[in-house]
Image (tube, rainbow, N blue to C red):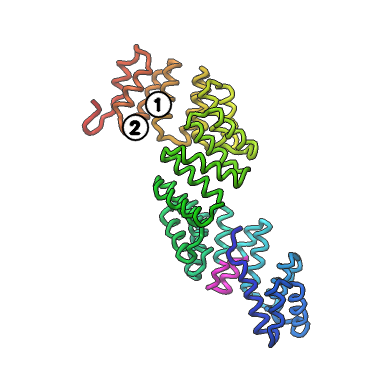
Amino acid sequence: MRNGWSERSNDSLRTILRTRMLASSSACLPFRNGRFEEAAGYVRRAIATNPINADYYYGLGSALLKLERHDEAAASFKDALRICPDHAEAQNELGKMHADRGHMEVAMSAYRQAIRSKSDYGEAYLNLGAALEAQGKLDDAAIAYGDAARLCPENVEVFKCLGIINTRRGRLDEAAAAYRRSLALHGDAPDIHNEIGIIYARQGRFDEAVTTYREALRLRPNFPDAHNNLGNALRHQGKLDEAIPCFLEALRLRPNYPECHNNLGIALKHKGKPEEAVKSYYTALQIRPDYPEAHNNLGIAYAEHGKLDAAAVCFQQAIRLRPDYVEAHANLANALADQGRLPDSVESYRRALQLRPDDPVLQKNLGIAFSKMDRFDEAVVAFREAIRFQPDGQSMLTTSLASLDHSRIHSARRTLIIKRPGGIG
């Protein structure tokens, strides 16, 4: 889990040691210098003199956490709560321990109790947001992160989390605003420049994406993710000769980088080097066998070389790994159609259309498959749907009619015309 508050428990313990345990700073120094066993000894002696001080038990738990003695740390936090049930810091620490073990519901209960005990506790809101995000509750997580940002407007990690969650929610402008706030707090942050570049790329603003990735690389030249992302942006601009060296540099820095091998394969394919592209896809799959996009791209490469059986296997594997992968369903349908397996092709087109019913190309291809099977009435229905979703209705009409048996063209033409303002000529 992301947690931008790793130093907070240190600060809390030092405060406890300084203000509530001893008049001198001797107990703080071991903790500050990483001598956690010694610090724990000081806290234990303080507990012996005053066993009903919840802060002492919290301080002991914090030291034991640093020593990775998790069971003892949890017991100390529980002792703090036994003495003071509203000890927000102890509740928060127990929540983090539960989250680290994957017990998210228990963790969230602890964070919420911490917030009830201390309503302005930004750390607990941040941790609650991370737990909600881990459960896929993105809108609730965004609310928790927003509360953390309101309470901790100078914390860089909070705004990074807001940027990530809003990117996942598709709220790209809000994500960019959060990242820019993070940069305002800490300008030399190459990872944030990289994230903003990703947003620009998703919005199709590739010139701005390229500029932003280059700024990330100025700050951190050995940043493989930024090299890979810069390569992708340049590829989308059609600058393959600039993109390929970016992918190669990313792979020099991180050889076992499956996404980059896949992206290099795409660039090599567009560069007219299909054999090298296939090698890149293979390498991606050797590193990450459960990579649906690489299976799909390898299938495309096979299909373009007439290896339809191998292509179909690749598309089927991509679908097994990601059942909602529309492009893989469509590519499988195309391969099956090219093999003459029209009934199987129709089923694959229908699965793709269940996922993306307003795709005119899928509707048109389904209509063509029906027409080749002499199922003209179903072909007409599919072509009508294609025309409905295709802005250029006349162009789609002409293409669709061309695939129908000549004996049915006249009746199909009458059926296909859709009345619109101005009509279709």
Q: Is residue 422 left or right of residue 375?
A: left
Vertical arrangement, residue 209 with respect to residue 359, above or below: below
Pick the front one: 189 or 107: 189
Q: Is residue 424 left or right of residue 333?
A: left
Residue 74 visible, this angle: no
Residue at screen point 76% across, 68% down: 72
| Quadrant the N terminus occupies | bottom right
Residue at screen point 52% across, 67% down: 155
Three-letter amino acid code at disc 2? Gln
Q: Give yes or no for residue 227 being in the magenta stretch.
A: no
Give the Cα separation between the discs numbered 2 and 1.
10 Å
| Location of residue 96 (image quadrant) | bottom right
Q: Which residues are magenta?
A: 110-124
Q: Are marks 2 and 1 in contact (CB under 8 Å)?
A: yes
Residue at screen point 30% across, 31% down: 392
Q: In the structure shown, which secondary structural element does the residue marked by tag 2 occupy?
A: loop
The overriding secondary structure of the stretch rendered in magenta is helix
Q: Which mark is residue 105?
A: none
